[in-house]
Image: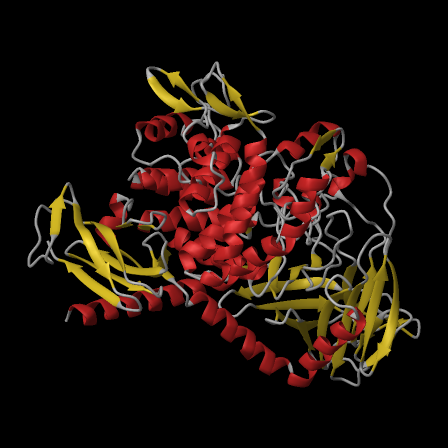
Amino acid sequence: MVISKVANASDQVTEVWGKTIQQAAFVKDGLERFRNPQYEYECLGLGGTVMRVGPDGFTQPGAMAVATNGWLQHLPYLSYQYWWDEEAHRHLPFDLVGGYGPNLQHGQVENFRHHLDIATGLLTIDLGLKADFVQTNSAKAGTKTFQSRREMFVTPEGVLVIRISDSTNAPLPFQVRVDVNSNVRIYLNGGVYAKEHAPWMGSGVSKTEGLVVVANRPKSCVATLALACEGADAFLDPEKLRLGATKPGKTVTFYIAPGSSYESADPVATAWQKAESAKTRGFESLRVETAKWWKKFYARSAVDVPDRDLANWFARSTYYMGVFFGKTDIPPGCNGTSVESFAGAICPEYDLVLNQMALLYGNHFEEARRVVGWVERALPRAERYATEGLALHNVSTKYSGGAKFGPLMGYDGTILVPPTEGEGVWAHEDFSGNNAALMAVNYVDWSGDSHYETLAKRILKETTQVSVEDLQWRPDLNAYLNKNMAATVQQAGTLFGLRESVRRGVAEPEWKDMASKVLLPTADYKGNKVLTVGPGATPAENSGDATWLSPVWYYPVVAAQAPLVSNSYSLFRTSKTGNYIFNNGWMGVIAAKLGKGDEAIRWARNFLQPGVALFDDSCFGELVSDTEDFKKTPEVAAHAALICNLTQMLLDPDDEKVIAVFPAIPAEWERRGVAFDKLAAKGGILVSAEFKTNRVCVTLENCSGADCTRILRVRLPNGTTRLRHPEKGVQVAEGWATLSALKLPAGQKVALTFDP
């Protein structure tokens, strides 16, 4: 009976989760949305291809009412995971323009609707277009409005599929042109990049019912874009790089596949093969296949929380994880795959760790493994940086061995040169390497994938070696400090590396003693010890940053129960740390670890402030800074941080000994009920649970290949002092049920109910 009840509860969570995903669709409806001065573009993506879709469905033109003056270019874009140069700059070589007539004009929009179904990855655009923008034989073709429907998605293989269906009164056939990017921007063209950059130069290669556009620029990949066309007597013009229909009012479908010489020795053939294969399979077959991929992706785990807005954004944030990590080998940058922030480079400094944690918590092990795959491919270059040296402007470092990662890196591990000399200090940042090790060992610990254990230990040891060589003994402090950058995050990363190296058997003999003598910077504040940004810093009221709590999460070197943590949180919570958007989720995680459900949900709701953290109901940005904020593409780590925030309220999955279920649900959730299915805890354990005022059900599935034992702690309904028919060994105290030695056989499920 117990197992049956838990199974039924799981089915209910899955059903609610499915409805949430449906309700979380992105919808823009009406000319008011079309003319929104803070318009944001929807994202489609899979397989390393990401399309940030313009109002008419292409990358040109952008939103009509957005002010173009400003330091950020706010345009839709098409990106591919292997479009880079040799210096760790991501590039967007191509623009897609679609329209009518010789100049591919778009028409005057009379009615407007976008519907992005995140359940299937399908974006449907309905436009009413006034047709008097074209001329035929020196006469206007007419003034009536015709309807155009654009349906688009990205397949798991990374092929962008676009189907255009015009009503029969359309005056001219629809065509697409590829523009090669002659206005190259790198790192906002600031600092050392404040100059004109060599443009991409393109040419077309004819194919049967299609073409491949090839773009070149110095010290960059050869970028290709293959377009196969289907329907309405398609034509192609390889010189003008366009193709499309020859008859108006018909349906035409484009299959668009990117390629790169950094991925393939023959990027033209590779891209064309993907586009041609997609065309052979056809629109409907690919649409179904893509929808199946998304269904399977969402089915890895499920949540049911009684706050509809947060539930919707949890689903949307999960969608963004799929867009940017689904079947993708090269991770995104700080703002997705946009080149407008940090040259689009990958960020092991903070962002990538947050992203991978969200994937692990949600049981998306395949996507989390691909992150480690990138770390593995970057490792040989990181080893060369350590032994041959790294120079950023006037700052240089060199080590006797190990592996040196940087805060911003390219597809192959090349460390990005920052725009200003002062930022050359990044060369001294070691904790990006500690994070590389953290991601590797976290993947092994959560998934139980023993194939990556040797690699994880190698990365751990080599990045720790770099951290150790940068330590110096400070007799005045009786501790070790990083001699170049003794920030709390760096000290915590070093401490993590040392402790984990000792624990996992890869440490040098002297590391065990050093591990107990690395200083975590603290100071006294009103009689309590709190974390600080670095040694000697003086705490002040309304100050402190979420990242200073990294020794608690995500480096587990300080127990959440330590007074240092609660004291630090109490100080930091009134600071402006939430102005960096993902810090809200970081603080929410700490609040959850402290058992503060009402605080944790407050941080989560900070993500949903219209015009502050959320614009045009499309995505979370990076900063609460200025009027340009809405122009940033999705801060993927902010979406990951929301996932982590809400997950930790439902389950503390980080401890290898203790699993805490419903550790920080707020009072309103206790009254209304909350549930989740197959969230992942460390050790390859999937946890499902349901909380009601009269019953709590929990099931744990040991997906690892070995038996294990855990301490299980389960939050009980308010006022519970004892249980009816308690499981053997259950102790009830202070609102919790505790099993001190719950045995979890390999490959088996254990189901429990707790009835007050």
Relative placement, left or right, of 745 versus 256 is left
Look at the image and tell me in which quarter the N terminus lies. bottom left
The reply to whether residue 620 is in sight is no
Q: Which one is nearer the viewer's eye here, 591 or 23? A: 591
Q: Which one is nearer the viewer's eye here, 620 or 318? A: 318
Say which residue appears at 71% left-offset and 38% top-offset: 390
Relative placement, left or right, of 291 versus 125 is left
Relative placement, left or right, of 425 versus 582 is right
Q: How is the image coloured?
A: secondary structure
Say which residue appears at 68% left-offset and 41% top-offset: 387
Displayed quadrant of residue 587? top left
Residue found at the very far front of the displayed protein: 509
Q: Which one is nearer the viewer's eye here, 368 or 472? A: 472
As drawn, 654 above or below 465: below
As drawn, 131 above or below 356: below
Q: Which one is nearer the viewer's eye here, 283 or 552? A: 552
The reply to whether residue 458 is in sight is yes
Say which residue appears at 84% left-offset and 66% top-offset: 214
As drawn, 262 above or below 624: below
Say which residue appears at 51% left-offset and 23% top-offset: 534
Residue 566 placed where, x, y %? Answer: 33, 30
Residue 730 placed where, x, y %? Answer: 12, 52
Residue 304 placed where, x, y %? Answer: 33, 59
Residue 187 placed where, x, y %? Answer: 74, 42
Callout count: 0
As drawn, 619 above or below 579: below
